[in-house]
Image (cartoon, coloured by chain):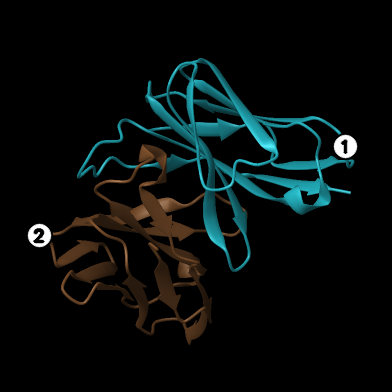
Amino acid sequence: KNQVEQSPQSLIILEGKNCTLQCNYTVSPFSNLRWYKQDTGRGPVSLTIMTFSENTKSNGRYTATLDADTKQSSLHITASQLSDSASYICVVSASWRKNAGNMLTFGGGTRLMVKP
Amino acid sequence: DVKVTQSSRYLVKRTGEKVFLECVQDMDHENMFWYRQDPGLGLRLIYFSYDVKMKEKGDIPEGYSVSREKKERFSLILESASTNQTSMYLCASSLGVTFLSTYEQYFGPGTRLTVT
């Protein structure tokens, strides 16, 4: 069964500090991996998309890494800001599913709180 | 910028009522999706539409139906609302769904539905 597990479930850090969020997946055959940021009461917004051949991708203070061999990804946030407080969702896409609409498997998310 | 809008941010309905959730996108995307999001469970796909009048069931279609009469509009219908359908409902759209696809999914702001 395709699964995406994220850790930790929640995290509290002080403003200015760095943090790393983890994502492990069993989705097969793998197509791409996405990280989304979801503010409270809002829809998810894409941060990065990585394909099999990419092992790192940055978007400002967000850097995602992908190890397709171990089926792990991480999202590193540098110099955190109060506005980084949100849920971060890892989403893995399969390159084939019987039902095309189900190609995405969502993780449960990590809830990050940045405190002043 | 892609814009996905949902008809209501908050909705309160009684058990047994018929509920309509509307979603509109302005980027001429072929594909539209309805998800529900519950704490600890992540996003789960209810229905998916890849063209006008075309639809496919997602992971949890029971108790729901959908309608896509126009390309830009995708409606989710709860035929007879029940308390276990209390949830956050998210609509999304994307340009395409293909093998090895990196097409972005753009999410609406969500509708928080409470069924009493």
**Residue B86, visible in the rendered structure:** no
Q: Position of residue B68 (x, y in %)?
A: 54, 20
Q: Between residues B104 and A16, which one lies in front from this camera angle? A: B104
Quarter of the image that includes the N terminus of chain B: top left
Going by the numbered disc 1, the residue's amino acid type is Gly
Please give the name of the residue rendered at 80% of the width and 48% of the height, measured from the top-left corner. Answer: B114
Chain to which mark 2 belongs? A
Badge 1 element: loop
Going by the numbered disc 2, the residue's amino acid type is Ser
Q: CA distance from mark 1 to mark 2?
A: 50 Å
Q: Which chain is cyan?
A: B
Please give the name of the residue rendered at 48% of the width and 20% of the height, measured from the top-left corner. Answer: B72
Residue density around tag 2, few if under 14, some if 14–19, many if 20 or more, within 10 Å = few
User: Which dot marks residue B16?
Assistant: 1
Badge 2 element: loop
User: Which dot marks residue A53?
Assistant: 2
Vertically, is B35 above or below A7? above
Position of A48 with respect to A4 (left or right) is left
Q: Are marks 1 and 2 on the same chain?
A: no
Please give the name of the residue rendered at 48% of the width and 68% of the height, measured from the top-left corner. Answer: A109
Q: Which chain is brown?
A: A
The answer to whether the residue labelled 1 contacts the one labelled 2, judged by CB atoms less than 8 Å apart, is: no
Residue density around tag 1, few if under 14, some if 14–19, many if 20 or more, within 10 Å = some
Q: Between residues A80 and B100, which one lies in front from this camera angle? A: B100
Please give the name of the residue rendered at 35% of the width and 77% of the height, measured from the top-left corner. Answer: A22
Q: Position of residue A110 (x, y in %)?
A: 48, 72
Q: Residue furthest top?
A: B69
Q: Between residues B114 and A37, which one lies in front from this camera angle? A: B114
